[in-house]
Amino acid sequence: MDSHRVSGNAATATLLFALSLLVCWLAARDFMKMWRDDVLVPLPEYRRIMLSDYLPKLAGTPVDTPVFIQDSGRPGAAVMVLGGTHPNEPSSFLSAVVLLENARVEAGRLIVVPFAMHAGFRHNFPQEASPSFLHFTLPDGSERVFRYGSRDMQHILMWPGPDIYKHKPSGQELSGNENKNLNRSYPGDPNGTLAEQLGFAIMELIRRENVDLAFDLHEASPEYPVIDAIVAHERSMELAAAVAMELKGMDIEIRLEPSPKNLRGLSHREWGDGTDTLPILMETANPSQGRLRGRTDEALALTGKDKAYAKARDMGNLFIPYSNGDQPVALRVARHLTAIRLFLEMLGLFHEGKDIVVEGIPHYEDMIAKGVGYYLKPLPID
């Protein structure tokens, strides 16, 4: 009897061990899919280099990322658009991708960095139940896929993390997990952590390319006060105020926020203090990263529809209208691209000799009506 019981326990243990190995293999396979870079189809006018061109020690590391430069050959301003600072904020990198695949520069230069925190696209937060991928259908019926990553760099690249993160060079103390956050790492350190090296390389890009106007695109929770907003350094404020007024005239509600001088490490502060560029950070509302959300899946990231947020709206707890019970990604991309287009149109009015002409940026109503997939190019056939 005892021998039968022992034999049965051994068989059960063997089966459970085999099942655990299968689950681990399936999880590892899905996780490793995120190590494959998203395929881009830039217009041929763009020249592709790597961020490591501005800090060679980044070459071959997981944080190195493509930089695309389109030079019209005609005098004008240089403008940089940085997407993917936080890879769980999809309208940020999708807006940059749409510019990369549609925008043609007639005067000046346009620099696009679609995946700034490259290492953050290689994983997500399993405890957040985030989707791993976003799928878009193109007009020809084909599909494009983009990763939905994490706010921070991969932990293994920055392990072990400190309990308290001290920002360089201000010495300001922040939560230890902020050491993996690109938007707390500026102005960076060429000999610091990988996040600090990344921040330094982006600052070097701005300096060496003489960038006149620089955008850092973001998303935030609908319950976050700084939402559907432009955050401007004091040197950018006059131009930002004019753009905000124009957006309001188009019935696009926007908040205009000054960059706090005592909050260090963020792009809208350090870019302005450490370079000659005019920094602009923009936020749209992303329910899939909020704290009040219900089920978290690809549909939420794409449509923004969430019963919990609809309830929060009825209770007056949101800082966006959420009038139709959704916040689709096409609306969020439309907000970013419309604001960028207005900044480009007005830049020369406020800064003499800094005109830039960019054609092909989708208009607000068109993006909302047609969707993001309409403006993505089919993948090349191997």
Image (cartoon, helix red, strand yellow):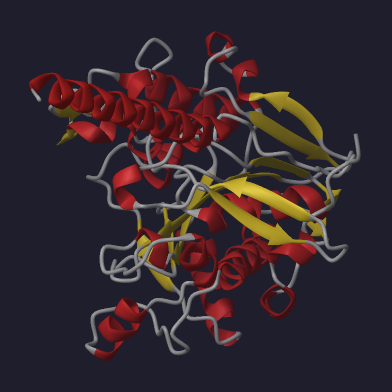
Q: Is residue 289 visible?
A: yes
Residue 264 x, y percent position in the rendering: 28, 39
Which quadrant of the view contains residue 362?
bottom right
Residue 201 appears left or right of 191: right
Q: Nearer the viewer, residue 35 or 184?
A: 35
Residue 358 vertical position relative to residue 306 in the rendered view, above or below: above
At horizontal 56% and vertical 29% (from top left) the residue drawn is 35
Residue 177 vertical position relative to residue 51 in the rendered view, above or below: below
Which quadrant of the view contains residue 27?
top left
Which quadrant of the view contains residue 78?
top right
Q: Nearer the viewer, residue 76 or 318?
A: 318
At horizontal 23% and vertical 18% (from top left) the residue drawn is 160
Residue 252 x, y percent position in the rendering: 54, 81
Residue 44 vertical position relative to residue 239 in the rendered view, above or below: above
**Quarter of the figure that contains the N terminus:** top left
User: How many badges with numbers are in the image?
Assistant: 0
Residue 370 x, y percent position in the rendering: 74, 75
At horizontal 54% and vertical 73% (from top left) the residue drawn is 328
**Quarter of the figure that contains the C terminus:** top right
Q: Is residue 186 visible?
A: no
Q: Nearer the viewer, residue 120 or 220?
A: 120
Residue furthest front in the image? 1
Residue 350 x, y percent position in the rendering: 62, 60
Residue 335 appears left or right of 28: right
